[in-house]
Image (cartoon, rainbow, N blue to C red):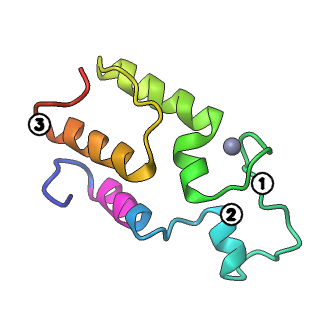
Amino acid sequence: MWEVKAPSKVKIFTWRLLLDRLPIRVQLIKKSIIPSSEANLCIFCAINDEDTFHFLFQCTFSVFVWQQVYTWLDRAPLVGLDQADHLLKTYNLLKGSPGNNK
Ligand SMILES: [Zn+2]
């Protein structure tokens, strides 16, 4: 992951994502940073709990953003992947390795 040509803030974000240490609402409640009395619903859709996977990969807003990114990169969007596969495909795409989904 560290050899990808990306700004260090992107690498650190990805590292925190892999460790499930992003300040997502469910994590903030779990660590008592925000009170559990506050709703843990996603800030975008207000339907599902705001956990890392939903926030970054499942939410309709996130799916839209990923579709735009992949369109911008002239690649077919990723659908139906779990978090690890999504990250791996994106990593390979950024790294420029062959065999990605186009
Ligand atoms: Zn959502």
Q: Tell me: residue 35, above or below residue 49.
A: below
What residue appears at the point 72 percent right and 74 percent down from the top-left corner?
A: 29
Tell me the amino acid under the disc marked 1: Leu
Residue occupying image coordinates x 11% and y 36%: 97
Three-letter code, disc 2: Arg
Q: Nearer the viewer, residue 86 or 72?
A: 86
Q: Which is closer to the viewer, label 2 or label 3?
A: 3
Q: Position of residue 2 (x, y in %)?
A: 18, 61
Q: From mark 1 to mark 2, how far is it between C-alphas?
A: 8 Å
Q: Earlier in the sequence, mark 2 or mark 3?
A: 2
Say which label, 1 or 3, has the lower sequence index. Answer: 1
Residue at which label 3 appears:
97
| Residue that appears at 39% across and 60% down | 13
Residue 102 — which label?
none
Q: Secondary structure at mark 1?
A: loop
**Label 1: which residue?**
41
Task: Tell me how many marks there are.
Answer: 3
**Mark found first going from the N terminus, 1 or 2:** 2
Q: Pointer 1 and pointer 2: residues touching (CB < 8 Å)?
A: yes
Q: Is residue 86 left or right of residue 26?
A: left
**Magenta region, mostly helix, strand or loop?**
helix
What range of the chain is rendered magenta? 8-15
Q: Position of residue 50 (x, y in %)?
A: 68, 55
Q: Position of residue 12 (x, y in %)?
A: 34, 63
Residue 14 in the magenta stretch? The answer is yes
Nearer to us in this view, 70 or 9: 70
Residue that protrudes farthest toward the bottom in the picture: 32
| Residue under pointer 2 | 25
Assign the C terminus to one quadrant of the image. Answer: top left
For the point 15% across and 30% down, which residue is it?
Answer: 99
